[in-house]
Amino acid sequence: MTERPARDRGAARRIRRQAARAGAARGAGEAGGGAEAVAGPEAAPPEDRTRAFLEKAAYVVAPGSVIVGLLYYIGRTYTTSYYVHFGIPTTDLELSRESYLAVVPTALFLPLWVLLWCVLVVLAVFGLVLHWLARPREKPLWQLAAVTCALAGGLLLLLGFPVFTEPSWWTRGVLSLLEAGWPRVVIPPLVVALGAALALFALRLHRIGRRERGAPPVGLRIQRLAGAVLIGLLTMSLFFSLARYADEAGDDQAALDAEAGFGGRVRVLINSRSPITHDAHGIEAKDLGDTGGPYRYQYRGFILLAKSSARYYLVSHERLWPKDVTVALPDNEDIRIETLG
């Protein structure tokens, strides 16, 4: 009678110990599973975090690289046009990328200011059209407005072929009607850009018109693709216009600097071992004789316009248009140049 209860108590203790071990094992498993859950969806592995960071950085770096490349092209166009006005090849100057980018504000401030104002005007007009079409009695005109904007935009976009290729009939028959200078080079590509903007507005009107009629959207993927293409055409037209303006602005600035006597440029005194033959106007030449030492001949009145690794490019302080000349002197021991304050 006394041994049986003792055996029962021992069996009960063994059952409780086994249950405790099983519960501890389950707790450890649940804790491990919870840790995996935390480390899984919420805390990604280091490789995934690095990949996500690089993808986000690409959205910022790639557009920035494109913008810097476009600004470099515009700066180079402006600088090349400026020096070509004086007959100086920019390839000989070996200018740095920073030198081209430094002139971009001079080349683009005015056109960008005007362009932003034009964008505001276009957006205001589009907003007024949307407000007018939103009135109840004008709702049937949504589709008509979309078709009208699409046709007008398509016709203006077709002008891009003669605008960008510039055939002889276009130059003689159409461009000759515009004033020479920046209007002739800027207005045609801006008209093409306006066509792209009208086509984008037509897509917007089409979507709003279907929604107003309660019709389900159709061809959303094609519309998005068409919108992306139109944005590309708009961007290319604006960039072409800015590049053409930079080319014209560089040449105009060179002419203005020459008329103003190259204010801000360095005047130089040239000492030479031998006489220098040139056709520059207003240069004072002096033969110092034996008192000049090895550099006997002295020339006063030149302005240093540019300097390459092998040449000095000089112009006269007096302009004799259209007979202006740029004198190129070699940078060697036969020439000594002194700058004047």
Image: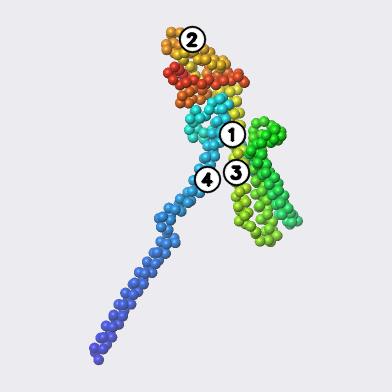
Residue 235 image label: 3
Q: Nearer the viewer, residue 195 or 274?
A: 274
Disc 4 vs disc 1: Cβ atoms closer than 8 Å?
A: no
> The N terminus is located in which quarter?
bottom left
Q: Position of residue 331 (x, y in %)?
A: 45, 21
Compared across the picture, whether 245 is left or right of 60 comes to right
Viewer can see residue 127? no
Residue 287 image label: 2
Image vertical order of residue 279 relative to residue 306, above or below: above
Q: Which residue is mark 1?
A: 246
Q: Residue furthest top?
A: 290
Q: Which residue is mark 4?
A: 63
Image vertical order of residue 285 relative to residue 157, above or below: above
Residue in view at x 56 percent, y 33 percent: 77
Q: Residue furthest bottom?
A: 1
Q: Nearer the viewer, residue 89 or 35?
A: 89
Residue in view at x 58 percent, y 23 percent: 258
Tell which circle, 2 or 1, labels the residue nearer the N-terminal end.
Answer: 1
Disc 4 vs disc 3: Cβ atoms closer than 8 Å?
A: no
Compared across the picture, whether 134 is left or right of 84 comes to right
Q: Amino acid at mark 4?
A: Pro
State how far apart marks 4 and 3 are (Cα). Answer: 13 Å
Tell which circle, 3 or 2, labels the residue nearer the N-terminal end.
Answer: 3
Viewer can see residue 318? yes
